Amino acid sequence: MTRAPLAQRLAAGIASAGLVAVLALAGGTTLPAPALATERGEPGGTEVTGGNSVDDAAEIEPGSYADEISYEDVDFGENHPASTYRISLEDGQSGYVSASMLRPEDAGSDAFGAAELEITVAAPADPSCSVSQSSRVSGNETGPVSVSISTGVLDGNNPNDSCFQRGGSFIVSVAWSETYDGLPQTLPLELQYVRQAATVWSQLPEPEENPALAEFLPESRGEAETLSPGWSFNTATELTEADAIVDAEVGRPLFFRAPLSTGQQLSLRARAASPADHTLTLRVFDPNLRPVAVARPGDEGAPASDMPDTNGTGTDASISIADSGGTTALTTRYPVNPRHEFVEFDDAKASSIAGDYYIVVTIEPPLIDAPATGTHQVRLSWESQGEPFDSAPEVEGAGAAPSYLGMELGTWVRIGGLGLGSVFLAIAGLLAILAIRRARR
């Protein structure tokens, strides 16, 4: 067999390498798609269209998704139509799914009634084998209607449901089951699917019902980045610096996210100089959108702080803004530990998944029916405290892909791969031309 000249063989080899680089880096496995939304009020995440039944359920991988959901009146006793999605889990894994319906910002305040969202996870072979949750939000409250659910650990000893014992495919159904006057018939819907890998539970620390609390953050007067907040969970703005300055519209929730590893707690501090008589509130949600138990200044057993006692419930911290301003703070009560899913003190369950934790900041008017007007600056500080565990299960879909200059890292890798492949192809073309010219001499 006659071999081609060296230059031709080299050109062909480089061309092949360039093509491989283009195909591998452009089409290979990358990080999950980032949660993108172009306009305020739009859902964030990869676009998906849910099915209408088990047979045409849309298959989703761990990550964030954007869809829409419609309300339909049904006769008493009938089920509302649901959007269906299919998820896959292996033995020992656990799945967490949440749905969040985005209401128009001008639909509320004087609205009478409530909106309800239901989510169900079922085994396709046996629809009666299922678990369900619902969430009902009053029309005069602001923010999305969110609901979450989990399969439990599929290890043969699952307390969640006797028929959820082993891995396989599961059908997630989301239904809009109650509405009120003023809401459109179709609204944006966000989905999040988090998958936690199997783990050796004995290698994780034993959970404590009353663990030591992280310290409250001191006042910070250093430089702060200026951020635009997200308007939903999937569009939440990532906090990359310790301090941020944000513009808060009265009555509009601001959404941020910060990463927590197993073994860590989140400490937050927020200050608003105005408006007087309004309330500044902080809330934290886990990657499955469950409200996280928090401790506030003045709580029994809480660390000392330089702030006045803070009001709120077990899952938020709020302060009335005085003429001189107002400062509120919190720390999550439990360090992240996957074993919290199995404890009897239920308020720890929302501190079991490592990943992005969501921070919601609101400035609320003094009265429910008071007009929500004006924009005011809030300084938000955060810090993760605690040493990560040496052994922890891998979690997929619990955080957005790392980004650089506003673009996800996986996209930069693909662009880099395309650029590198183009360079290879250009060199190959040049060598091929030289080889042909030499062959003609």
Image: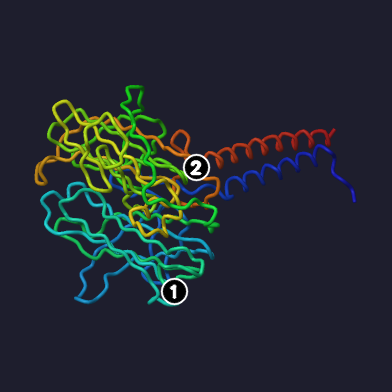
In the image, what residue occupies the spot 18% across and 50% down? 141
- Residue 224, how many percent across, how many down? 35, 26
**Which residue is label 1 attached to?**
163
Seen as rendered, the residue at the extreme top is 222
Seen as rendered, the residue at the extreme right is 1
- Residue 342, how many percent across, how many down? 42, 60
Q: How many marks?
A: 2
- Residue 299, how many percent across, how many down? 26, 41
In the image, what residue occupies the spot 56% across and 40% down? 413
**Residue nearer the viewer, 248 or 326:** 326
**Which residue is label 2 attached to?**
388
- SS for tag 1? loop
Amino acid type of the residue that numbered disc 2 sits on in the rendered structure: Pro
**Vertical position of residue 248 compared to residue 235: above or below:** above
Give neighbour class at mark 1: few <14, some 14-19, many 20+ (Cα, 10 Å): some
Give neighbour class at mark 2: few <14, some 14-19, many 20+ (Cα, 10 Å): some
**Residue nearer the viewer, 6 or 132:** 132
Is 106 placed left or right of 40 in the picture? left
- Residue 353, how many percent across, how many down? 43, 51
Which of the two discs, 1 and 2, sits closer to the camera? 2
Amino acid type of the residue that numbered disc 1 sits on in the rendered structure: Cys
**Vertical position of residue 135 compared to residue 166: above or below:** above
In the image, what residue occupies the spot 55% across and 49% down? 391
In the image, what residue occupies the spot 26% across and 48% down? 314
Find residue 48 and report its image quarter.
Answer: bottom left
The colour scheme used here is: rainbow
- SS for tag 2? loop
Quadrant into which the C terminus falls: top right
